[in-house]
Image (cartoon, grey):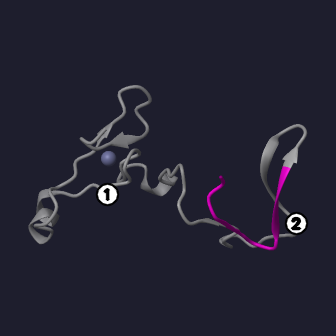
Amino acid sequence: MSPPVDLSPSAYLEDHPSVGRGVFASTIIPAGTEILSVADPLICIPDEAHLDTCCHYCMAEATDEASYVNQAYRPPVKLSYCLGCRVVKYCSKY
Ligand SMILES: [Zn+2]
């Protein structure tokens, strides 16, 4: 069963013979336009702007001791680089 997907009318799903299944534009789509929304995604990764501040596993945002004072309901989240790729970061849950 596929998750519910809300696809823009300016895009369509197709099984392309050379690149496989994907989302393709049916018209010129302006930058920043939302073309696909999945209510309950199976995979979620931080975008490039959040690689240093977001856990790649659980999406927790890094916090420091100062912000911990204001968020007494949650412990501070410290992120460490992946020992394999040294690009993404993980919190202690991983
Ligand atoms: Zn995490």
**Residue pictured at 31% horizontal, 38% vertical:** 94
**Magenta span of residues:** 1-14
Residue most toward the top?
A: 84
From the Cβ of disc 2, is ligand 1 less than 8 Å away? no
- CB-based contact (under 8 Å), mark 2 and mark 1: no
- N-terminal-most mark, 2 or 1: 2
List x then y, in percent, for residue 44. 50, 52
Quickly name the residue at label 2. Answer: 26
Residue most toward the front?
A: 1
Neighbour class for label 1 at 10 Å: few (<14), some, many (≥20)? some
List x then y, in percent, for residue 24. 82, 57
**Residue pictured at 56% horizontal, 66% vertical:** 39
Corner quadrant of residue 60 = bottom left
Neighbour class for label 2 at 10 Å: few (<14), some, many (≥20)? few
Quickly name the residue at label 1. Answer: 61
Q: Is residue 85 magenta?
A: no
Q: Is residue 8 magenta?
A: yes
Distance from Cα at disc 2 to Cα at disc 1: 36 Å
**Residue pictured at 88% horizontal, 45% vertical:** 16
Q: Is residue 15 shown left or right of residue 69?
A: right
* SS label for mark 2: loop
